[in-house]
Image: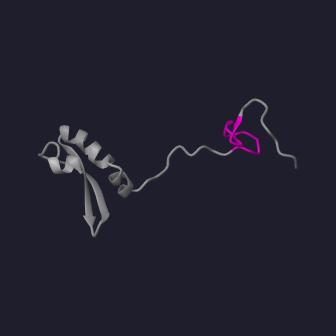
Amino acid sequence: MAAQICGNYEHKHDICYCSPNSTCDKYEPIKMVNRKSWDEFRNNGLLWWINMILHTFGWAIVTEIDEGKIIDVYPARVKFRGFGEKNNTE
């Protein structure tokens, strides 16, 4: 069977960006969400950054760490606001 190519849409990098009902042989669904680990989120500084915002409202994302590995993550109400100088400069 010969490959069907869409005539109405452009193919970029040899992938078809047609509708999900396309009969084009080059159609691949676009992955919209890529799951990442909490370790990567934390190591990239995103946990610190989002907690800076959450602290303004008395909230935080808490990570429990055992032997260098994150074992639990949960939201919590907190009494403190912001981080100390050591946390902000590392």
Extreme residue toward the left, this view: 79
Residue 30 drawn at (x, y percent): 60, 43
Q: Nearer the viewer, residue 62 or 43?
A: 43
> Is residue 16 one of those drawn in magenta?
yes
| Residue name at image x 21 percent, y 46 percent | 88
Q: Nearer the viewer, residue 18 or 12?
A: 12
Q: Nearer the viewer, residue 8 or 22?
A: 8
Q: Main secondary structure of the magenta part?
A: loop
Extreme residue toward the right, this view: 1
> Is residue 21 one of those drawn in magenta?
yes
Where residue 24 sits, quadrant-wise, is top right
Direction from residue 17 to residue 7 in the image, left or right: right
Direction from residue 9 to residue 54 in the image, left or right: left
Q: Is residue 57 visible?
A: no
| Residue name at image x 30 percent, y 49 percent | 47
Q: Is residue 45 visible?
A: yes
| Residue name at image x 29 percent, y 56 percent | 73
| Residue name at image x 20 percent, y 50 percent | 87
Extreme residue toward the top, this view: 8
Residue 79 drawn at (x, y percent): 11, 46
Q: Nearer the viewer, residue 39 or 28?
A: 39
Where residue 3 sits, quadrant-wise, is top right
Q: Give the answer, above or below, for where 73 lies relative to 18.
A: below
**Span of residues in magenta:** 11-27
Residue 72 drawn at (x, y percent): 30, 61
Extreme residue toward the bottom, this view: 67
Residue 20 drawn at (x, y percent): 66, 40
